[in-house]
Amino acid sequence: MSKTERFHHSQHQQEQRQNELGLPQPCLHLSEFRSQHGTKPFRALQECLRVRPLGRAAIRREPKEVPRCGACGEAARPRLYACVACAAVSCHVHAAVHAELVRPGHEIAVDVDRAELFCCVCRDQVYDRDFDAAFVLAQTAASTLGGSIRSPLPENLRKRRRVDYRPWNPDLRERVFVGRNSSPLQRTDGDSSSELPWGLRGLNNLGNTCFMNSVLQALLHTPPLRNYFLSDRHNRYFCQKKNSVKKNAANNDSNSNKNSSVCLACDLDEMFSKVFSGARTPYSPAKFLYSWWQHAANLASYEQQDAHEFFISTLDGIHEKVEKDKRKPQSQGNGDCCIAHRVFSGILRSDVMCTACGFTSTTYDPCVDISLDLEPNQGASGRTTSSKSHHPCNGKADSLNSSQNCGISTLMGCLDRFTRPERLGSDQKFFCQQCQVRQESLKQMSIRKLPLVSCFHIKRFEHSSIRKMSRKVDRYLQFPFSLDMAPYLSSSILRSRFGNRIFSFEGDEPDASNELSSEFELFAVITHTGKLDAGHYVTYLRLSNQWYKCDDAWITQVNENIVRAAQGYMMFYVQKMLYYRASEKPVAS
């Protein structure tokens, strides 16, 4: 078989693979060009690759070159193309003329501002896998110095197979075992509260503890967390027995931690048992409050605390206990160290790009929630810096709307702002490894790995360094019941940065399971009503496709329009493939 025949045979196989994967059909002119010249012209183009801010690639022979059309001399055209064969630059109009006038072999050009192939005869963008692969690798190497200083990827970024949910059908042996070791829950059919979903129970306010009750209601009805504790994955009796042995061994150690016996997971396990016992009278989480006081001694008081701070502190308390019980410490971003991080932990990607040379420094950080700034008011005067504050509040108070708090924000708009490139100030210059000096830079955040449950915290408490005052932002926030997180993933951000390619670069996840896992369903909303110095927390839960308001000890059914109009402070979304109606009433057989 001759060289030409082998080439056409490989091209035919490539066309079959592209048809199976749904990729664009190869251009006949591009195929003919490759049969005549191979990939040598593409390799020569790599020497002219220039990386601009945000990592975007361009084709320039010199860094400060201003390309112009050789026919009309225009440099401000929206598209300029350089012939791959002779490097002649033409605009969109004269590119086809150049291909017709010059001898065959000049049909393929490259977009000088996007580094993408263009067929001058078809007048359309064309794709070549080898070209895209070479340019993505060269672009990555140019923006990261060959990737030598890139931070290592966390362990939990390895692909895992998605396991479909399957209901448990016990066999005869399991039925006998369950029958001998359990008793049926008693329902009070005459009570009107029995119409509520199973496990929905009010929590008594123990003295300005609405911040705790609101978060606990959300945790008690987080599907993966609920399934974990109700399946006895953390047995408090076994854990306490194990801790008593360790406590006796540590009594001889004068430097032992006094709070080593505190286990918030055990208190959560007991609370799950009480709440899902079938009782409808409000439950008092006094034991959990006392254990949390021991864990966070600086917050041990009957003053109102921030619900978001309590949420973070509770997850940290569960994580620290697991760390102490294990010999080898595990990273928080691993996602497998404890149930708290297995449910809520994700990975954020931060790209800091030099505006002078395009060098990019990438870091990965674990997170259990995402704090979002509200979209700025149109025409608002002054700029404030958002920060989470410790705001005491006693009792309930009505929201005071002012002219400063008017306007509407959306959760998608807040996420767009979170992942939007931000130019860092002159006082935040970073040391560029390529320029070897401090340069101005752009910073862009994205989500590298989504958790099972995404928690979004809205920064409603602002501090102005100019006015030296704090206030609460009562601006209305629209949030959807179904949320697609695909536009905010690192793979989507990188794909827009690298351009239209058919090459799977680092961070790109082309499999279908990733698309499914990017869809989330809202199941809990924590709201804050009132002012900065006086307010109240309430939780709205979505159970059996119906919304319920959890106001401390009072549980009431509400319309979804009430939830949409609420002043959201924390929103909890669970992956759609895990959101099934497990709390619906069983059908009598």
Image (tube, rainbow, N blue to C red):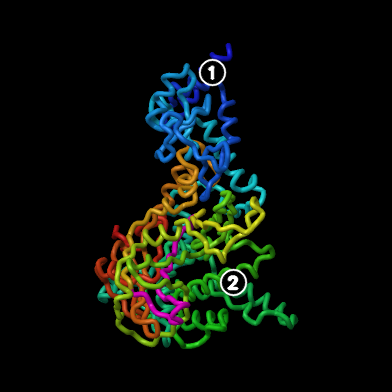
* Residue 211, image quadrant: bottom left
Q: Residue at x 36, y 73 (%)?
A: 527
- x, y percentage for residue 172? 45, 53
Residue bounds of the magenta highlight = 450-474
The dominant secondary structure in magenta is: strand
Mark 2 secondary-structure assignment: helix
Task: Kindly identify which residue carries mark 1.
Answer: 36
- Can I make out residue 276 in this image? no
Q: Which residue is mark 2?
A: 239
Spot occupied by residue 171 in the image (x, y as percentages of width and height): 45, 52
Tell which residue pokes out farthest to the top in this image.
1
Q: Nearer the viewer, residue 405 or 257?
A: 405
Q: Is residue 300 above or below residue 375?
A: below
Provide residue 287's location: percent of width, then percent of height.
50, 82
**Does the magenta-highlighted stretch encompass residue 458?**
yes
Residue, x 46% and y 58% (percent of image)? 452
Report the front residue among 63 and 335.
63
Q: Quadrant of the C terminus?
A: bottom left
The reply to whether residue 138 is in sight is yes
Q: Nearer the viewer, mark 1 or mark 2?
A: 1
